[in-house]
């Protein structure tokens, strides 16, 4: 494994020895796997599997339907007889990354490069940095386990397809439930600058497909204009977004303190002189944990029913479809006070944060596993060209995980 640095930066890298070289080496190795969501992640998973098996650990893989992607779940058991698998702490991370298409990178995005005090590469921040640090703590955990000093199991969960709807995590959760494992806690290592995120919003993506009736534009009374009816529904979605932003039960702890609705794409029509028979638009809903999808779906369906009645009075075969394309649950901070106190003690930072973006954390909390988000790097660097993680963040994450392991140790 190598880490490259340009000649112009060589002088600024003389302090690299101050940072956790092994974690940086692992991060370099992970970035070298092109795990963009449209590609397979099996090369990375097999590499990590081999590493875990060299440590004497048994690895569970769960595959997608096409068998070209896999989750990995591995446990360092606790107890003097090394037979305790239930309970314990899960370190969770996703192996897929977003594409680099159309982005102007200063270096190869799939070859880690250190410039100054930052390590650049796709996934360096989101979120292979946390995975690298988690892999580095495994040998220490195994040593403690063999000595009978690990008081609770340590689990590592690596998923696929988080970036395209958190598709892998439910398979991990189903697998560990089938094996009778009920973890005490979970830490999802998304980039938070190593601060504690205790809750996040959910996300649901919807497509509205408006079916009208074509006619020549000189005979509009014989057609049903799909774009016109779509625009009425778009206007209603915008008005609903304004309404929910003014609710009395919004949460000021969130960086965006209200649930949001946003229309993202729209397309329709073939020519100016043809009444369009089809228009589609998409919108997303990012809900506070105490709000549900039904809070916005119900009024939108009522509006659709009203518009359908108008359209079908002119032509029975017209109408509007509402299709949900993606859904990731919100993560609440219910029933995780004990975990929050532990993380505050380990980080030395008692501040709690709530954020607008979604993670796999909501799926873990929905499964009854108290969860927080805490990982190296800033979310502001995620998905961008020249994505980076500060080397100091990797150092902080290593220190945090070492303290976490010590909290699971008995003399």
Image (cartoon, helix red, strand yellow):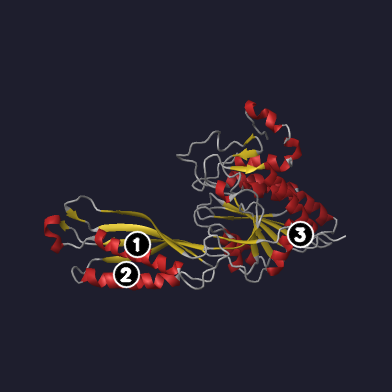
Q: Which mark is residue 77?
A: 3
Q: Which mark is residue 330?
A: none
Return the residue at label 1.
208
Who's the residue at 64% across and 26% down the image? 7
Q: Earlier in the sequence, mark 1 or mark 2?
A: 1
Q: Earlier in the sequence, mark 3 or mark 2?
A: 3
Who's the residue at 58% across and 45% down the image? 123
* In-image side of 81 versus 271 (left or right): right
Who's the residue at 29% across and 61% down the image? 231
* In-image side of 133 versus 319 (left or right): right
Q: How many circles with numbers are drawn on the protein?
A: 3
Instruction: Find the distance from the CA under tag 1 to the CA under tag 2.
Output: 10 Å
Q: Quadrant of residue 389?
A: top right
Would you place residue 407 above or below residue 399 in this image? Answer: below
Instruction: Find the distance from the CA under tag 3 to the CA under tag 1.
Output: 49 Å
Q: Which mark is residue 304?
A: 2
Query: Quarter holding the C terminus?
Result: bottom right
Q: Quadrant of residue 19?
A: top right
């Amino acid at each position: 494994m190598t880490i490259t640095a340009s000649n112009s930066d060589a002088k600024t890298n003389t302090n690299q020895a101050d940072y956790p070289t092994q974690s940086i080496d692992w991060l370099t190795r992970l970035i070298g796997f092109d795990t963009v969501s449209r590609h397979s992640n099996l090369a990375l998973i097999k590499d990590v599997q081999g590493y875990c098996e060299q440590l004497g650990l048994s690895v569970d893989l769960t595959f997608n339907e096409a068998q070209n992607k896999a989750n990995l779940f591995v446990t360092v058991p606790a107890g003097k007889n090394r037979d305790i698998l239930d309970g314990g702490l899960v370190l969770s991370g996703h192996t897929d990354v977003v594409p680099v298409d159309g982005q102007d990178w200063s270096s190869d995005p799939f070859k880690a490069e250190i410039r100054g005090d930052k390590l650049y590469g796709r996934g360096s921040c989101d979120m292979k940095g946390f995975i690298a640090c988690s892999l580095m703590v495994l040998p220490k955990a195994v040593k403690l386990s063999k000595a009978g000093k690990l008081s609770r199991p340590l689990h590592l969960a690596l998923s696929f397809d988080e970036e395209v709807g958190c598709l892998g995590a439910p398979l991990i959760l189903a697998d560990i439930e089938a094996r009778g494992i009920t973890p005490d806690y979970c830490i999802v290592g998304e980039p938070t600058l190593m601060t504690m995120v205790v809750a996040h919003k959910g996300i649901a993506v919807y497509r509205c497909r408006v079916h009208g009736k074509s006619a020549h534009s000189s005979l509009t009374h014989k057609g049903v204009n799909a774009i016109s009816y779509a625009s009425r529904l778009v206007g209603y979605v915008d008005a609903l977004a304004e309404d929910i932003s003014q609710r009395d039960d919004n949460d000021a702890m969130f960086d965006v303190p209200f649930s949001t609705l946003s229309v993202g794409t729209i397309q329709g029509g073939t020519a100016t002189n043809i009444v369009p028979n089809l228009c589609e638009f998409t919108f997303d809903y990012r809900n506070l944990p105490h709000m549900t999808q039904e809070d916005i779906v119900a009024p939108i369906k009522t509006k659709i029913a009203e518009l359908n009645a108008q359209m079908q009075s002119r032509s029975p075969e017209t109408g509007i479809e509402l299709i949900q394309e993606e859904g990731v649950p919100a993560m609440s901070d219910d029933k995780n006070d004990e975990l929050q106190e532990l993380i505050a003690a380990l980080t030395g930072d008692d501040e709690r944060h709530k954020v607008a973006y979604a993670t796999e954390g909501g799926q873990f909390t929905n499964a009854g596993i108290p969860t927080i988000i805490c990982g190296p790097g800033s979310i502001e660097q995620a998905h961008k060209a020249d994505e980076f993680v500060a080397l100091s963040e990797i150092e902080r994450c290593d220190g945090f995980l070492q303290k976490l392991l010590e909290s699971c140790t008995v003399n």
